[in-house]
Amino acid sequence: MAITPGYTVEEIRNFVYQYEKIPHGYKAIWLAEQEFSRHHFRKWRLATFNGDLDRGLIPRSRVGRVPNNPRQLMQSAIEDNQAKRIAELEERNAQLEAANEALGKAIGLLHDRNAQEPDATPTTPRPDDS
């Protein structure tokens, strides 16, 4: 279940990150230009920085406030995502290397097998050909 129908978790996270990058004094203007309400955005921001966005949890009250330094949390989240992606890529690389090694061995076996067989079938002379 999405935190807000019509928006994915990634879209919401991107909105929050865009907002955090906007200089002070322009944030209200940016919010006014968006299709979503200030109320929804406040919930999205709380959910993003409190770690509830990925789990689809919706903040019910103002108990969980946005931390003092959301940009630091944003950078931390980006680094965590990058580390996770790097780990996934390293795992995929290991799988591809194993497949490549197995394919190389199979090709080597085929070459060995073809090298042992003669190129053409030998012909034996017929008795009436002499």
Image (spheres, rainbow, N blue to C red):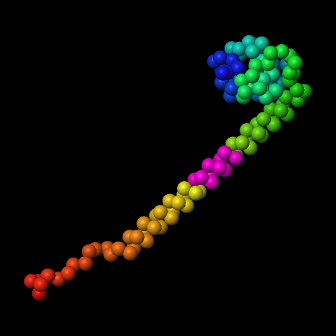
In which quadrant of the rendered view does residue 36 lie?
top right
In which quadrant of the rendered view does residue 101 lie?
bottom right
The one nearer the camera, 56 or 78, is 56
| Image location of residue 93, percent across then percent down | 62, 52
Residue 94 highlighted magenta (yes or no): yes
Residue 35 highlighted magenta (yes or no): no
Name the quarter where the C terminus is drawn: bottom left
Q: Is residue 89 visible?
A: yes
Q: Is residue 14 visible?
A: no
> What span is in magenta?
87-96
| Image location of residue 69, percent across then percent down | 88, 29
Name the quarter where the N terminus is drawn: top right
The relative height of residue 34 versus residue 118 in the rendered view (above or below) is above
What residue do we see at 69% from left, 17% from top? 4
Q: Residue furthest bottom?
A: 130
Taking 28 as reference, is 100 left or right? left
| Image location of residue 127, percent across then percent down | 12, 84
What residue do we see at 26% from left, 74% from top? 121
The relative height of residue 71 versus residue 36 in the rendered view (above or below) is below
| Magenta-drawn stretch, dominant element (helix, strand or loop) | helix
What residue do we see at 46% from left, 64% from top? 107
The relative height of residue 95 versus residue 43 in the rendered view (above or below) is below
| Image location of residue 76, percent across then percent down | 81, 37
